[in-house]
Image (cartoon, helix red, strand yellow):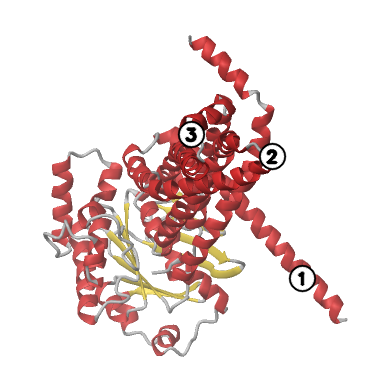
Amino acid sequence: MSQLAALPSSIVRLGDRVLTGVGALGEFGLLIAASFRAVQQRGIPLRETALQFELIAVRSTPIVAVTALFTGMVLALQTAFALSRFGAKPYVGSILGLAIVRELGPVLAALMVAGRVGAGITSELGSMKVTEQVDAIRAMGADPVEKLVLPRVIAATVGLPLLTLFAIVLGILGGLLVADLQYRIAPDFFLQTVSTAVTVGDFFSGVIKTFVFGWTLAMVACFVGLRADGGTAGVGRATTQSVVVASIAVLVSDFFLTKLLMLVPTDRILISIGRLLS
Amino acid sequence: MSAVTPVIALRGVRKAFRGEPVLRGVDLTVAKGGTFTILGGSGSGKSVCLKHMIGLLEADAGQVLIEGRDVTHLSESGWIDERKHFGMVFQGAALFDSLSVLENVAYPIREHRRDPEERVRERVRTCLAAVGLPGIEELVPAELSGGMRKRVGVARAIALEPSVILYDEPTTGLDPANSRRIGRLIRQLQQQLGVTSVVVTHDMELCYATSDRIALLRDGRIVLEGAASELANSSHPEMHAFLEGTHESQLPAAAARAQEDSSLA
């Protein structure tokens, strides 16, 4: 009897969770739609976006720099160690270049920004929500999506690709330092192996993904922040949730975007564009 | 009520949070001019009631009318126009922490008018003087006391010269002197600006000091409504129960929590 009684209640709980999840997805969709509508109707709030660009992108450069530099360094150590088994140590630059340009630069920059900026956005908007500041914006006849969401989402969408470029340069620099100091691979040769291995297409497929990452992580952070309730504890919960969801979203979308971009002949497209322009 | 179209009317408004009903069919009519007070205990749904008047919450059932127009299911962009005529003072003042007092009070002006900077500053000066806080433009909200924050909140609410001002628990968290000062301010603004004020409170002193009409909300319904002068001396059982606290709210705890979540200070 007790098992029978337990079964429906667990199904009810499961059903509740599914409904809550579907409801949240629907609300997320509505927020995305509202953000596009706000751009269409009232354009981009330039002043606030510039301010957010400073907070989101410019102030993320130190953390992205340290992450990229040390990842490049450790990757050079590991790659050279592995390649030395096949006597191919001098080609560490080829593998490192491809790994950083195609994958590690974009993803590490995105994860660092998801942690630093995602948490910042969610806790700020969450605090504004629970102290009724978001309601105050609405009560004064303004649109919180335009005032709060758009500037952050645009700043992150534009800022993350720039941070990624920066991460790629520093990652390769880190690799170059270790290759030179530890394995006596001449910097010239190292850079030559990098540039031979990495095509313009690799570069684009790496950087293009980060527009999606930047947009996704800021959108998630804003959404979770604006849904926060239950006082300061609720803001804390929302902040954790935001970082977890944004990081997972970056990693999962990375796989599918990479797969998708592999189907597109980026190199050929870029060469044709280059020909058209010249 | 009178034949004149009421400024705000709620007709059978119902609202539930997470399945728990908070408003169970609220009917009330706010006439033009004067101060209308919604009285009720904690968790009775009075802040929820107020938020329906300015579209911060959407009714599950029933009607919200502003000057006779049905605004119950107005879109957010439709509300933007309506809200220009409203000022709202929030429970915790809800000032923007990142902006100075000047920018807080100027916010609605900059949002809706293309005034030159000097004119905006002049208007902010006037509003701050009206609430008795001249010359604090450059301070930030963190530097203000609770009473000052509330008054800056009032200054922001009157910045666009609204025809209706909504006050959500204006004296909560204030000492008696500051509470009386807010009460005088509400009365004074109502008389000087000729606005219609709607006050939500459980503070009886404030209620009698400011109100022209009073409605008592209990368990999500208006149980008593009348002129302040009549109710002040009334021995009506509902009023008596509210004052003596003998009529504990029968709302389920979850509903009270949901309401507090939605109107957290």
Q: Residues within 10 Å of mark 1 (few under 14, many from 20)?
A: few
Mark 1 and mark 3 lie on one chain; the one further toward the N terminus is: 1
Q: Return the disc, 2 or 3, that comes first in the chain's sequence.
A: 2
Residues tagged 2 and 3 counted as in contact (Cβ below 8 A):
no
Given the image, on which type of amino acid does mark 2 rest? Phe
Closer to the observer: label 1 or label 3? 3
Query: For the image shown, how many numbered marks are present on the structure?
Result: 3
Q: Please report contact status of discs 2 and 1: CB closer than 8 Å, yes or no.
A: no
Which picture quadrant has residue B242? bottom left
Residue at the spot of label 1: A10
Query: Label 1 marks which chain's residue?
Result: A
The type of residue carrying mark 3 is Ala
- Label 2 and label 1: CA atoms lie apart by 56 Å
What label does residue A86 carry, if any?
2
In-image side of B31 versus B133 (left or right):
right
Q: CA distance from mark 2 to mark 3?
A: 20 Å
Query: Disc 1 to disc 3, how far (Cα)?
Result: 64 Å
- Residue with the mark numbered 3: A186
Q: Is any atom of residue A73 visible in this view?
A: yes
Q: Which quadrant, please, contains the N terminus of chain A?
A: bottom right
Q: Residue at x 60, y 54 (%)?
A: A24
